[in-house]
Image: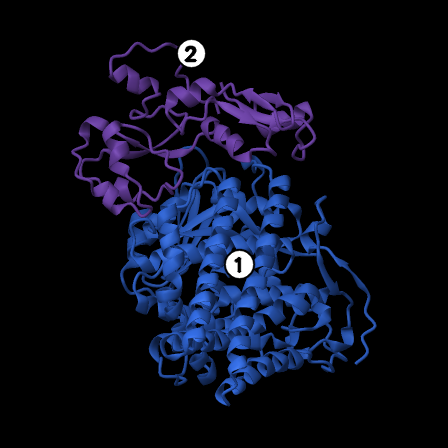
Chain colours: A blue, B purple
Amino acid sequence: MAVSGRLHLCTPIHNRVGSRHSEGFLITVCQSFPQWLDSRGAHGIPGLSEAGTNLLFRPYGYVLGLVVLVIGCSIWGLVTGQPEVIVWLTLGYLAYEISLTLFLFVATALGIAAWQRGYRPPCPEAAHPVSVLIAAHNEADCILETLTSVFGQVGVVPEVIVASDGSTDGMNEMLIRTFGLTAVDGQERWCGEVPRADTAPARLTLLALPKVGKGAALNAGLRVAEAELLVTLDADTLLAPRALLELAATFEDGVTVAAGGFIYVRGAAGGPWMVRHQYLEFFRNFMWRIGLAHCGVCLQVSGAFGAFRTAALREVGGFSEATLVEDYEIIYRLHEVYQRLGRVYAVRVAPAAVAYTDAPRTPWAFVKQRTRWFAGFLNTLWDYRRMIGAPSYRAIGCFMLPVKVVDALLPIWGITSLFILVGAFLFGREQWRWYAVALFGAKWLYDLVLTGLLVSLHERTFPGRPLSLGRARLVLTILTEAIGFHWFRQAAVLNAYRWFGFGIRRWEQARWQPAGGKPPVRTAAPALSWLGFGKRQQDHSQP
Amino acid sequence: VTCVAVCVGRYVRAGAGTREGNKRHSGKVMPIRCGPAARVVCRADSMAGGRGAGPPRGGQTTCLVLSSVTWSGCSRVSRPEIRIFADKPKCISCNICTRVCHMGIDVMGYASQGRPMDDVECVRCAACVTSCPMDVLSFGMTGKEHPHDPASRLYQLRRGASVPGSAVTGSQL
């Protein structure tokens, strides 16, 4: 296939407009190939031409094939008993992980440097109006605290919408009683005002929906949101006092369509080991995201605390109601639609917007949550496979999604490597034992050094936000990661492959039918008819 | 005295830099020089130390670009903000507030000393306020007259202290 594309330095997209920094260093083939566009991804959005867009080029096949080939060959070599394959397999896995994390670290350092140069403390008077949308199902025990932390925000008086997704634990009644809400539209919509000492009262809307699913609940909230920005918040996520102000300030440039905050896991210092590991994991991930957003390839804005331009959300059709990870899917859709429309846009991270979330405390809850996340990731990647490797999606298509493909299949490789190393240590000859020990040691050391660098970067950047875990606990957490936490993560991944294979694609299926059946899912249509929200039409072919 | 440092050097936010822009931005303008050695004593100094409304910062502020954290710290003092105050004599040290805190903050430590909550991790979720059996804790605004704020005129009058007129006027915002 002849590609006559121009090679040029592709600067991060958010740096091209409204900023004087341009540390772009991703060299990608940037050219638009309209004839390659896939008509299946049109989302029914005006402006996205569907005519003449028969898909001629599906590069995802090549990418996927290559990754499967490499992994398959190495595992085949192992089965047929070639000892050098063991070396290649384990070393290859480590080399990939190390090179990726090194890239991420450099990107993060550059991203933080650029952010610090461009950062202005936001001005409360100029803050965008914000709607905060909390989709909650049976969260009576924590929603009040969350709401209080939202209403106590500095500089922003948000309009808060609680979309109660069929709550049966008395959450609706509690909110109605506590805030003195009055019914506006039958028994489904309640409104009230929360007085504040310093500013105008904040408005609180409660949508008492039947059980419709998280995506549908979010869409119902999106429908009634009036502000320019929509912040999605989990009911168990508490906001730091300036979080909304900082997050809203990210949208000042006019091109940002989505921005994520920095989420820490709370209660790590005195919590169980599972929470400590997740604290470290969240910390690493959110640091990486600063780097990814700097490169213009951020694929993740956490729904637990993320902001979207309301108009952009409506334009791309709202949240998906047929996915396990609606916050992840929406970013893919935003990228796809905006790249195809040729708009200048940015998905960013606001490192100064801080939130604290709850993490599963027991291994079982953790595996369940991670299974849902990873299965959702696999489903989303498969749904948007047309973007993988496609040059028309620029750095997202050419760099980030191929990396995601490797990430999706890497656990197979990782688990095999892990078993090999453990096997080599337990049953192998002496040189194999030394090999296993050396490799494990090197990985441990690398993790320690890298996390140490990240922590010092964090300390240097945010001196007012010390990490909850002290140094000794951090080191202990890093060292025990490979022994305990990692295995639970891998168990979740294996379970997620099973979900993916059986086509479990919705929260409801995940909750009620873990065996892999496909029960009829109650649709949102009748309940939400008064909101004028039908189910979003989208092609969801089963893998 | 409300004091917010505004950088009038190279790195200014849109609208600032001009006299009008600065006024709109903060109120009181305090120009500072940009550069690695740019350090001025913030006029909120007395407030920062006297009110106990924040960690000791020495009242110093630097260029926005070099140390945004210091700057926003200064800004925190000058802008009214919702905060949790404690009525020290009522505290019976039952430790319920610390136990219910979602962020693991030693709330009782603050309450038993009568200090307003200034932990950076406090999210004002009110878990401690609502669970306190003795109503020790309450919400209030910094810069407003709150009876449990040690820097407020009301507090000092209640404690029988003589109140110098200028020192405790609080924020004029």
Q: Which residue is disc 2 drawn over?
A: B166
Between residue B28 and residue A17, name the one nearer to us. A17
Element assignment for label 2:
loop
Residue B39 point in image, percent of width and height: 57, 23
- Residue A477 against residue A375 in the figure, above or below: above
The quarter of the rendered structure image containing the N terminus of chain A is bottom right
Q: Left or right: B74 with respect to A397?
A: left
Mark 2 or mark 1, whichever is nearer to me: 1
Residue B84 point in image, percent of width and height: 33, 34
- Mark 1, Cα crowd under 10 Å, few <14 / some 14-19 / many 20+, is many
- Subunit that carries the residue with mark 1: A
- Mark 2, Cα crowd under 10 Å, few <14 / some 14-19 / many 20+, is few
Residue A273 point in image, percent of width and height: 31, 58
Q: Which mark is residue A199?
A: none
- Residue A72 against residue A339 in the figure, above or below: below
Between residue A83 and residue A110, name the one nearer to us. A83
Mark 2: which amino acid? Ser
Q: Residue at x 28, y 15 (%)?
A: B157
Q: Residue at x 42, y 51 (%)?
A: A264
Tags 2 and 1 on a common chain: no
Say how many tags the image has: 2
Residue B53 point in image, percent of width and height: 39, 27
Q: Residue furthest front?
A: A430
Between residue A339 and residue A24, name the one nearer to us. A24
Q: Which mark is residue A301?
A: 1
The answer to whether residue A270 shows anywhere in this view is: yes
- Subunit that carries the residue with mark 2: B
Element assignment for label 1:
loop
Q: Left or right: B102 with respect to A437?
A: left
> How far is disc 2 from disc 1 in space, using C-alphas?
48 Å
